[in-house]
Amino acid sequence: MTTSVLDRAGTAAIHQEKTGLWSWITTVDHKRIGIMYGASAFLFFLIGGLEALLIRVQLSRPDNTFITPEFYNQLFTMHGTTMIFLGVMPLSAMFFNFFIPLQLGARDVAFPRLNAFSLWVFILGGLYLNASFLFGAAPNGGWFGYANLSSKQYSPGLNMDFWAIGLQILGIASLAAGVNFFVTILNMRTPGMKLMRMPMFVWSSFITQLLVLLSFPVITVALIMLMFDRLFGTHFYSPQGGGDPILWQHLFWVFGHPEVYILILPSFGIVSEIMPVFSRKPLFGYAAMVFAMAFIAVLGFGVWSHHMFATGMGPIAHTVFSLATMLIAIPTGVKIFNWLGTAWGGSLQMKTPMYFSLGFIAMFIIGGLSGVMHSSAPADLQQTDSYFVVAHFHYVLFGGSIFALTAGAYYWWPKMFGTMLDEAVGKLHFWLMLIGFNLTFFPMHIVGLHGMPRRVYTYSAGFGFETLNLIETVGSFVLASSFLVFMYNMLKTAKSGAKAPADPWNGATLEWAIPSPPQEFNFPDEITVHGRDPLWEMKRANGGRLPEPQRVSGAGIHLPPPSIWPLVCAIGVTAVFVSLMLHEKTGPVGIVLAVSLLFLSIYKWAFEPVH
Amino acid sequence: MAHAEAHAHPATSTGIDNRKLAIWTFIGSECLFFASLISTYLVYRGKSLVGPFPKDIFEIPLVTFGTALLLFSSLFVVLALNAAEQGNRGKTILWLGLTITCGLFFIGMQVYEFSHFFHKGLTMQGNLFGASFYTLTGFHGTHVTIGVVWLLTVFIELLRGKLPPAKALNLELAALYWHFVDVVWIVIFPVVYLMN
């Protein structure tokens, strides 16, 4: 092996980290792609947050006329769509990209160019979806776009075209990434890293990709048929042609329920990384954690109809789906007890990532409890379409996913950027977020049970909704301010943050074995692992902390060359969909041009020399 | 010391080539794509309000011929792969050429069938049968077309002498996809054409 390095030393240039805009556009480095996922997803997240604030201002007092009902419909639809597809999913993708190869001890993902392709399709899809605002035609039929509200008859504008096509574009990004990470995790593990030795974040990502691979094709088909209904006049979902609107609900939720686990499982993984490190104890019940997630994933495909109790599917279907839904509480409870068991008796290091992780556990339990309440069909009939449901899914998606993703941001920031986020500001961020979050969403349980419907642009005085809605609105601004504090922390750190050592938290996993930020090639030497907490084992063998790893020359290390074709191909994919949407205006010419571009870029990509 | 490992193709953890595992993963995902389309077709079977209905227009002998072509093409591509792995260029050209020919004839059959049905009044807009039939078989036909283009690409590489036994995997990947497209048709053929 060493001889080969010497062989190459004369010819290969020392790898210099390339800089400049072009190097980012053509990059295939999983770390840079991860950072771009994070930056773009954070921007979309802020847009989604702004939409939420406008909604809260409108609802701050009864009979408010701050925004029109039409615009209100666009706001809640885009808020939901943005937070799910452009916020939480790509923020998770940031961590998949940056940390799966590092935790596996790998040099990159299995298909670096496909990885860049996923990123660009996601960004273009997100821009396309948000471009609808420029036409005053943002999607307005709710994030689950129920038929036949989504039909041409009831939504004649471009609004739902943007939605149906935007989600198909984003689905392609998710599927490409799904294949990539599935193969990466199975095939790119460093020697000794058996499946049951993988870090829990990798396990959670692996199961997430499995869910993506099996659920996104279903919504793709549902969206294709919606698109055909709207663009070509088919009757898949319109009763006047014999179609059944309920078919949409089935297809949508066969995707939609696994999707909620796609949103939460990566967060489970992040918290499972943080709890052991800041409790100074190995994760409690590793195997039980893995099997609990696998169980959740399997059950996740068998509970979709609990979103549809109000359609009246009959007592047998209601019973089966109620029971299956209640079952999910068991593996979820296992996870929560294991996190608590990890902290129990540990020497807790109360750093910011730990604050957010503990906040996650507490908030997620509340969301989980209201979820169990929905699983009972009769109770659900009372709660469905009310603010109680809004409270529930914000407790699991914000209290769950966003708290955990923020925990992950504080935990991994030093590794990604080589600087330490400020602890004091971080704790201020946490308390503002926790208080703001509960002020915003807890009262929704109460107004929901009192009958306040979701998705209605206003409410009348005298129903007892006024005070609680005002509290919610105040809470939402506290919540928003917590993110201003976060951004201040990021800026402060960028300007004058303390330099991060390789292993600031005394971590257990391989990403902490290399300098912060990592060099382009990640690991200069292959690492062999012998257990579940490889870095802790190395430290034990060494009798204490390891010496700070030095930056080394990467001479002789082969890295995949940069490529422009993933971006061109992503533009081709987007162009095909846009040409379909505009087919009445451009005719077949647009479609032919777009398909040609896609075809050309695929061939240029396939035949691009990579060595 | 492990610098060199990055040069040579490193062995994968499972021993399966990355690209091959990716194709299998993609096929697994595609199963759900076709499952959704086939389910939709089944849900809407017999629900059309107006004709034409399946029994009015289906020509079973023609489709059976097309099905046979597709099944034989799966056999041919196996033989082509075997020949490619053994470095038998002549046989690879023969079997791969036959595979592609079968695929092209199948696409031709489908184009004829679609235009024939269209003239008999079956449209996407007319009834649910038309919408679900054209969508399901149309997406399958698109997959066949992509498969033919892929196989043709490998065929051209073969003719240019760029498919030595060491690179037979390039053919195997296309063949895997081709088998999958055939298997889907084996489901579609009885479900759509025979169960009436």
Image (cartoon, coloured by chain):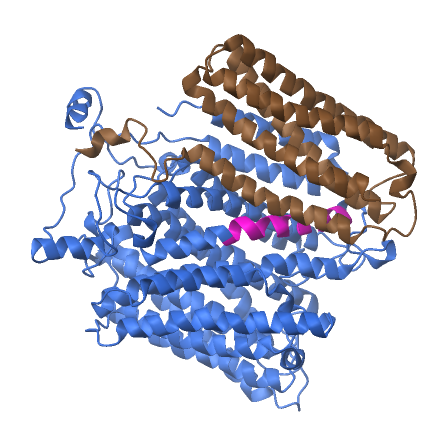
Does the rendering let one see residue A56?
A: no
Q: Does the magenta segment cover residue A226?
A: yes
Q: Does the magenta segment cover residue A254?
A: no
Tell me: residue A608, above or below residue B140: above
A498 or A452: nearer the eye? A452
Percent x, y for residue B143? Answer: 65, 33
* Residue at position x 73%, y 35% in the image: A586
Q: Which residues are magenta?
A: A211-229
B180 or A244: nearer the eye? B180
Tell me: residue A485, above or below residue A222: below
* Residue at position x 65%, y 84% in the image: A451
> Can you name the residue that lies furthest to the left here?
A543
Percent x, y for residue A402? Answer: 42, 65
Q: Is residue B74 left or right of residue A367?
A: right
Percent x, y for residue A99? Answer: 33, 50
Prevailing SS of the magenta stretch: helix
User: What is chain B's hue in the picture?
Assistant: brown
> Can you name the residue that lies furthest to the top here?
B90
Tell me: residue A483, above or below residue A472: above
Question: Residue A250 appears in which quarter of the rendering?
Answer: bottom right
* Residue at position x 40%, y 79% in the image: A435
Q: Is residue B28 left or right of residue A92?
A: right
Q: Is residue A242 left or right of residue B37?
A: right
Kindly indicate which chain is depicted in blue in the rendered structure.
A
**In the rendered view of the protein, which quadrant contains the C terminus of chain B?**
top right
Percent x, y for residue A18? Answer: 29, 35
**In the rendered view of the protein, which quadrant contains the N terminus of chain B?**
top left
Q: Is residue A268 left or right of residue B3?
A: right
Does the rendering let one see residue A346?
A: yes
